[in-house]
Amino acid sequence: EKLTDDEMREITDAFRQYDKNEDGSISCEELGCVLRSFGQNPTQAELKELIKEMDPNKNGRIEFKEFVDGMSRRGIKSQEQEEDELLAAFRVFDRDDNGYITAPELRHVMTSCGEPMTDDEVDKMIEEADVDEDGRVNYQEFVRMMASRP
């Protein structure tokens, strides 16, 4: 996948931030930090896979070109794209467009997606996301819930 100029700039800036000695490479340990700077939250297993992919010569360093290739395969999203996708997802659940996701809306969407949930499962999801305890999930609560997913 071809990167846009903006994506390339973001990748370059993030890489440079962690390439302290400016030798054109970062350590495998720093990869997680770089990915988190893009708002991604890879698991340890995902990081191990990425390191295998991005460090083919197994020297413990990820060269800039290897990093760019790996990131273009992984797909980089700008903060704006992430926010647009979250808002679109929220709107799918907020069927009556009132700014809240209720238990019946959540149940309906999950069932429509082939993921039927019991009333208890739906109630538990709403309860976990519902910070202000009003029995429904607003957009900020939805964003917080999505950000805390593994």
Image: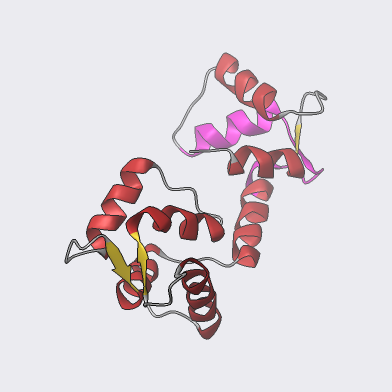
Q: Is residue 132 left or right of residue 111?
A: right
Residue 26: x %, y % from top left: 38, 66
Q: Residue furthest bottom?
A: 5
Q: Residue at x 71, y 42 (%)?
A: 94
Is residue 68 at least partly visible in the picture?
yes
Q: Residue at x 75, y 44 (%)?
A: 139
Q: Residue at x 57, y 37 (%)?
A: 109
Q: Is residue 40 shown in magenta?
A: no
Q: Nearer the viewer, residue 5 or 28?
A: 28
Residue 73: x %, y % from top left: 34, 67
The magenta region covers 92-113
Its colouring scheme is: secondary structure
Is residue 96 at least partly visible in the picture?
no
Residue 45: x %, y % from top left: 31, 42
Residue 145 against residue 19 in the figure, above or below? above
| Quadrant in which residue 83 is drawn | bottom right
Q: Is residue 128 left or right of residue 74?
A: right
Q: Residue at x 53, y 34 (%)?
A: 110
Tally the numbered discs.
0
Q: Quadrant of the N terminus?
A: bottom left
Q: Residue furthest left?
A: 57
Q: Is residue 146 left or right of residue 72?
A: right
Q: Residue furthest front?
A: 21
Q: Residue furthest top?
A: 120
Residue 69: x %, y % from top left: 32, 73
Residue 127 against residue 57 in the figure, above or below? above
Q: Nearer the viewer, residue 101 or 83?
A: 83
Q: Nearer the viewer, residue 54 or 20?
A: 20
